[in-house]
Amino acid sequence: MRPWCSTSTVVPDAMRSTLLRTGRRLAIAAAALSLAACSLLKPADKAEEGDKGTATTPAGETATDGREVPTVRLITAQTPAVRTYRKIGARHIYNKYASRIYKGKLPPLVYAVVVVETDIDATGKVVNVTFSRTPSHAPEVAPMIAEMIKAASPLPNPGKLGGHTYVDTWLWDRSDKFQIDSLTQGQRSR
């Protein structure tokens, strides 16, 4: 009689290397997702203390009991209508800055990736530009993007969608040319 624990499974080398590659890919994906979750769940900026011991939030709200009042930015759900408008907005920006658009596929490593939140009103006027992600190695890029978006205002009228906040990703090349993720032509492989 053979004990159940004495049997060993022989795994062929080809299968073993496939399993190792798959495991590495899953570990990388898990790490990327956890980093993304950390950036989405980061606490709001700390409120500054007022002269009388009250906390003041960026929106100007005050907590009289001395505790901070957290602020939360509401971003419009990225519904099909918002995704469609995002492409319309990107096309408007492409038309405004035709000479700054990177032609063709971007190189494998772009200089900067910036996630931009653009608040527009019911007429398409840009009300505010904020960032979910900015590159620490390229601090000059985010302000340039904000200025470009504001200078392109008003964006096309959003119609029934009304005023909302939409999110798009800007892919910035070292040449100061860019593509917007909604309209990107992709990246070249290495």
Image: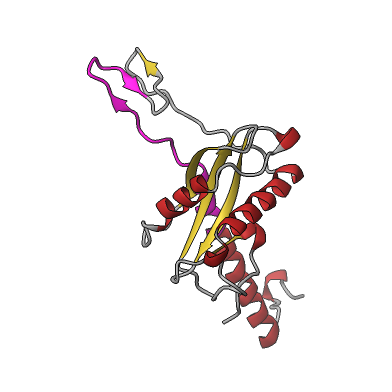
Q: Is residue 43 above or below residue 64?
A: below
The answer to whether residue 54 is visible is yes
Q: Quarter-wise, where is residue 27 in the image?
A: bottom right
Residue at position x 44%, y 37% in the image: 43
Question: x and y percent of residue 52 in the render?
Answer: 24, 14
Q: Is residue 110 left or right of residue 183?
A: left
Question: x and y percent of residue 7 in the render?
Answer: 71, 77
User: In this picture, which residue range is highlighted in magenta?
Assistant: 32-56
Residue at position x 38%, y 36% in the image: 45
* Residue 79 within the magenta-colored segment of the rendering: no
Tell which of 28 and 106 is nearer to you. 106
Tell which of 113 and 175 is nearer to you. 175
Question: x and y percent of residue 100 in the render?
Answer: 52, 65
Q: Is residue 161 above or below residue 189?
A: above
Residue at position x 50%, y 73% in the image: 109
Q: Is residue 158 above or below residue 2?
A: above
Q: Is residue 172 left or right of residue 167?
A: left
Q: Quarter-wise, where is residue 136 in the image?
A: bottom left
* Residue 37 within the magenta-colored segment of the rendering: yes
Quadrant including the C terminus: bottom right
Tell which of 147 and 1 is nearer to you. 147
The answer to whether residue 12 is visible is no
